[in-house]
Structure formats: structure tokens, C-alpha cells
Image (spheres, rainbow, N blue to C red):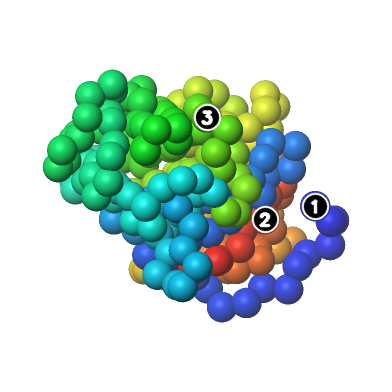
Amino acid sequence: MSDYVLQCGAAPTAGSKYLVWVDQVGAFLLSLKNEVAIGGPAIDGGAADISFLANLSRRHATIVRSGERYVLHAQAPSHVAGRPVHDRSDLTDGCEILLGGSVRLAFRQPSVMSGTARIDFLSDHRPARAVDAIILMDDTCLVGPGTDKHIRCRPGQSALLLYRRDGKLWCKSREDVFVDGQHAPEGAELRSGSVVTGNELRFRIEQIG
């Protein structure tokens, strides 16, 4: 990522999708929606929220967040924890999701302090936008070192919190962080294109939907 501050646009609103690029860590798809449709490529429009480059139905399954629960609704052949899903199935931390015959995903809720979930890839299939994991964000998303973080960074990098405020996305940290070059000791709103820097940490966020 370049050292200069990128030009920021309009502030993102809740219910959107973002890409988060973390230097020396990876790229993450961040969704704030309560219902996320998963499927295969769609040629004539109407693609799922998360579209895999795989032999899946256009809208193969939907993950719904309801309070502290996550439920997978199957619209096409799906398995959770090795069992076929004929209608819906609760998702629990560590369970494996199989879509079709080959797309294997791991569902994780790494922190008991947050309702946010993370989806890791167990097979070689990836979304149309190549990322390292998918974050299904509830009210907060933990970023930093440690297995309890939704976006896991390297040891020594700053830890910070992404959170919703007034329908927009904000970040704050107990450590010194800068948003678009401005010191943000009380937190700051993130806009599409914002760059956040801290101790050995730098990431850029872009709204994509």
C-alpha cells in the first residue's frame, strides 16, 4: 500500500459490502448485511452477495443472522457438519459448510464478545473478488493479533475495533492510530478509500456495494 493518503469519497452506510486490505496480512470481504446470499457466477445479473467461481446455483444458500444466532438456509444441495440441510441449519463455531459437492467453508465465531462471524476457505474455491476470508459483521469487528480476532494480524501490530455508529463505519483503538493521516484518539469515521495506520499496522477499506 502506498504511503500517501488516498482521496476519500462518501461515507459508507450500513448494509453494504467492503474490501479491507491489510498490509502483509491479506484481503478480507466485510459484509454488514443480516442476510448474505451465497452462489455461483451469474451471467445475466442477479448475482449472490458472495459469488464463488464454482459450480453452484446462482443463489445456492443464504446465511441469516438473527440476534446471536446464524442460520444457513439451503436453496440447493448443502451440508453443515457433515449432515444434509433440507431446509435450514444452525451454524456453530467451527462447523464445516459444504455447498454443492466441492465448496468447503469453515464457519467461525472467534470472540464471545462479538456476534461477528468469519468464513474461512477449506477448498480451493474463492469468491469472484479474491480474498482470504469473509467477515459477517454484526456491531463490531476485532482487528489485531490473536485467535480471538476476526481479522487476524501479525504479532506486534496494533489492535483496533471496527464498529457501527449512526449507520456508518467507525474505528477506534487504545493505541495511537491515524485515519487518513489524522490522529484519532477518540475514534474516527471510515470512508470509502480511508487508510488506517497504527503500530506496524496499515489497512485500506473500500466500499464495493
Instruction: Mark 2 or mark 1: name the one nearer the start of the chain.
Output: 1
Q: CA distance from mark 3 to mark 2?
A: 27 Å
Numbered disc 3: secondary structure? loop
Residue at the right extreme of this rendering: 3
Percent position of residue 45, x then y: 45, 72
Percent position of residue 179, x then y: 66, 59
Instruction: Mark 3 or mark 1: name the one nearer the start of the chain.
Output: 1
Question: Which residue is located at x 50 percent, y 45 percent?
Answer: 54
Say above or below: 116 vs 29: above
- Relative placement, left or right, of 61 versus 134 is left
Residue at the left extreme of this rendering: 87
User: Type of residue at label 1?
Assistant: Met
Q: Nearer the viewer, mark 3 or mark 2?
A: 3
Tell whether label 2 touches label 3 (CB within 8 Å).
no
Tell whether label 1 touches label 2 (CB within 8 Å).
yes
Residue bearing the label numbered 3? 123
Q: CA distance from mark 3 to mark 1?
A: 28 Å
Residue bearing the label numbered 1? 1
User: Type of residue at label 3?
Assistant: Ser
Question: Which residue is located at x 36 percent, y 26 percent?
Answer: 96
Percent position of residue 199, x then y: 72, 38
Q: Is residue 172 visible?
A: no
Q: Is residue 131 visible?
A: yes
Residue 204, disc: 2
Q: Nearer the viewer, mark 3 or mark 1?
A: 3
Give the number of callouts: 3
